[in-house]
Amino acid sequence: MRWDPGLYARHAGHRGRPFFDLVGRIDHACPRSVVDLGCGPGNLTEALAQRWPDASVRGVDSSADMIGAARRRPAPPNLAFEVGDLRDYRPGSDEVVVTNAALQWIPGHRDLLTAWAEALPAGGWIALQVPGNFTAPSHALMREHAASPRWADRLRGVLRHDDAVGAPADYLAQLLDAGLEADVWETTYQQVLTGEDAVLGWVRGTALLPVLEVLSDQEAAEFEAGYGELLRRAYPRGGHGTVFGFRRIFAVGHRPA
């Protein structure tokens, strides 16, 4: 799937807030090795390198475009980036493992999480955040439109839903079963987006990508026209902008030293 770092970064403030809410729960004073799995364009990984200047920090992402953008950023000397499939990651000596808004793209990611948690070293931390908005109008309407007679044959099986993420209780049980102390919570951010078709602009950078990947440019424009009309009804623009509620699920685990 082709990611556009520039498009993704248009909502950097809103996308970054859950990251900082997540890593704010990590209570490690001086880890030696930190990894950010699904690091995207690297701006948030840089915050980890600044927080722990004596740690070796690396960002991993499957998108060469994202890693290219990350490597073009001025970086602290303790920060490096690499292209890699998260399914191939093994914790090893990493004392802090962060994955922010990435695991929802990987079918069966809860098995990965269990393996990572069980391999976490003593004193180590693992922190994840995934979107919990797959039943929100933004996603439900996308699936509804994709299942319409016009698009059903072209888009059958493209969009995931039921298996995309677990419930907060699922992640809590996994971390506890792996022998970790666990802190799991959820938050719905009431984001105010600006501009025309603001919600469509948001999902273009993330959730809509699987659809755009399989459609021609002409088909994509047609799909967006119909989908955008549905979004305008569900998310009417008000005097302050368009309010877009976004639920996020967080889980942090710690293995006592």
Image: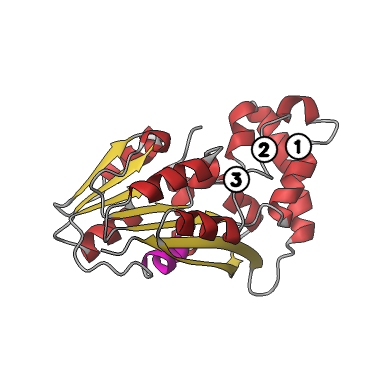
Instruction: Confirm whether residue 75 shows in the render.
Output: no
Residue 18, magenta (yes or no)? yes
Kindly identify which numbered label has been placed on residue 115: none
Instruction: Confirm whether residue 117 shows in the render.
Output: yes
Task: From the top left corner, tell me how far across and down residue 57 is, in percent.
Answer: 23, 51
- Distance from the alpha carbon under mark 1 to that under mark 3: 13 Å
What residue is shown at x 29% (from left), y 58% (from top)? 124
Q: List the residue tagged with mark 2.
A: 159
Contact? badges 2 and 1 (CB < 8 Å) = yes
Task: From the top left corner, tell me how far across and down residue 68 is, in percent.
Answer: 31, 38
Q: Which part of the image, by quadrant, shows the C terminus?
A: bottom left
Q: Considering the numbered disc 1 on the image, is that residue within a helix, a strand or a loop?
A: helix
Task: From the top left corner, tell me how far across and down residue 253 is, in percent.
Answer: 40, 61
- Left or right position of 45 against 205: left
| Residue span colored magenta | 15-23
Magenta portion: prevailing SS class: helix
Q: List the residue tagged with mark 3.
A: 207
Q: List the residue tagged with mark 1.
A: 146
The amino acid type of the residue labelled 3 equals Ala
- Examine the image and state in which quarter residue 160 appears: top right
Q: Nearer the viewer, residue 133 or 1?
A: 133
Compared with residue 43, is residue 4 higher up or lower down, i.e. above or below? above
Q: Nearer the viewer, residue 228 or 170?
A: 170
Q: Earlier in the sequence, mark 2 or mark 1?
A: 1
Residue 116, magenta (yes or no)? no
What residue is shown at x 43% (from left), y 69% (from top)? 21
Q: How many marks?
A: 3
